[in-house]
Amino acid sequence: MKKYIIFTTMILLLLSCGTRKQDLRDLEVTLNSVNYALESNNSEKIENAIREIEVLLPKFTKHQALRQKKYQLEIKLKRYEDAINTIDSILKIDPNSIDHRITQGILLEIIGKNMESVVVLEKALELLSNRPETITIGAEKRSFIAAINRVMVLKLLKRDKPEDYDNLRLSDAAIKYPSIAKTINLLELGDRDRLINNYR
């Protein structure tokens, strides 16, 4: 009897390993298909990629990149409500995701839910404010990107001020990296509505 239980357990383990390997192969194939669809304007390919993602999501319940690609595809098809719902599923996994909140705030404004957009962007701003400012050589660029995100959210909320951009320009990162200084200028001189239209 013991041998039978051990044998059955081994068979089940081997089968589950084989299934997991197949799931990972399916994930790789789907991600390749999705990346191709993201570069394409063919709505049929985009639809197929979304369906492939939906098949895999139950197997990879916490795979944020899969969900992110799904909402990017939904945006390409101008399915903003679907994209907002997909972002909600990401925020259930990672409620502190600032980038996804910013995208969701922009999409809410596109579909005319301006008050909800403000609430979401305010939450992103709050999360950005709560980030510890650790300036080291390795993290310097990363914390600076958070500061740029903060100013971008202020611009979306129509609360940016000239001194916000001046503070960015005076930072070590802006002085060391010319591309960052250029980004600051583009953000300051850029039109808020044009920023939003990038998602349409």
Image (cartoon, helix red, strand yellow):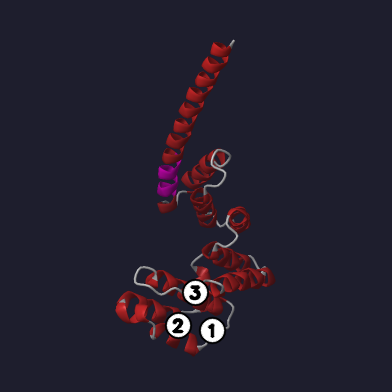
Q: Which residue is mark 3?
A: 194
Q: Is mark 1 in CB contact (under 8 Å) with mark 3?
A: no
- Helix, strand or loop at mark 2: helix
Q: Is mark 2 in CB contact (under 8 Å) with mark 1?
A: yes
Residues in magenta, as a range: 30-37
In the rendered view, would you say 169 is above or below 49? Answer: below
Reading the chain from its start, which is encountered first: label 2 or label 1?
1
- Residue 35 belongs to magenta span: yes
Q: Which residue is mark 2?
A: 188
- Helix, strand or loop at mark 3: helix
| Location of residue 176 (image quadrant) | bottom left
Main secondary structure along the magenta-highlighted residues:
helix
Instruction: State the residue in front, 140 or 50.
Output: 140
Q: Name which residue lies at 43% across and 43% down.
A: 33
Instruction: State the residue in front, 138 or 39.
Output: 138
Q: Which quarter shows the N terminus?
A: top right
| Residue 139 horizontal/vertical position (percent) | 39, 69
Q: Name which residue lies at 56% across and 57% down.
A: 78
Q: Which mark is residue 126?
A: none
Specify few, some or many for label 2: CA neighbours under 10 Å numbering under 14, 14-19, or 20 or more: some
Query: Which amino acid, by three-letter code, is at mark 3?
Result: Arg
Instruction: State the residue in front, 9 or 3.
Output: 3
| Residue 129 horizontal/vertical position (percent) | 56, 75
Q: Which residue is mark 1?
A: 160
Query: Which amino acid, by three-letter code, is at mark 2?
Result: Glu
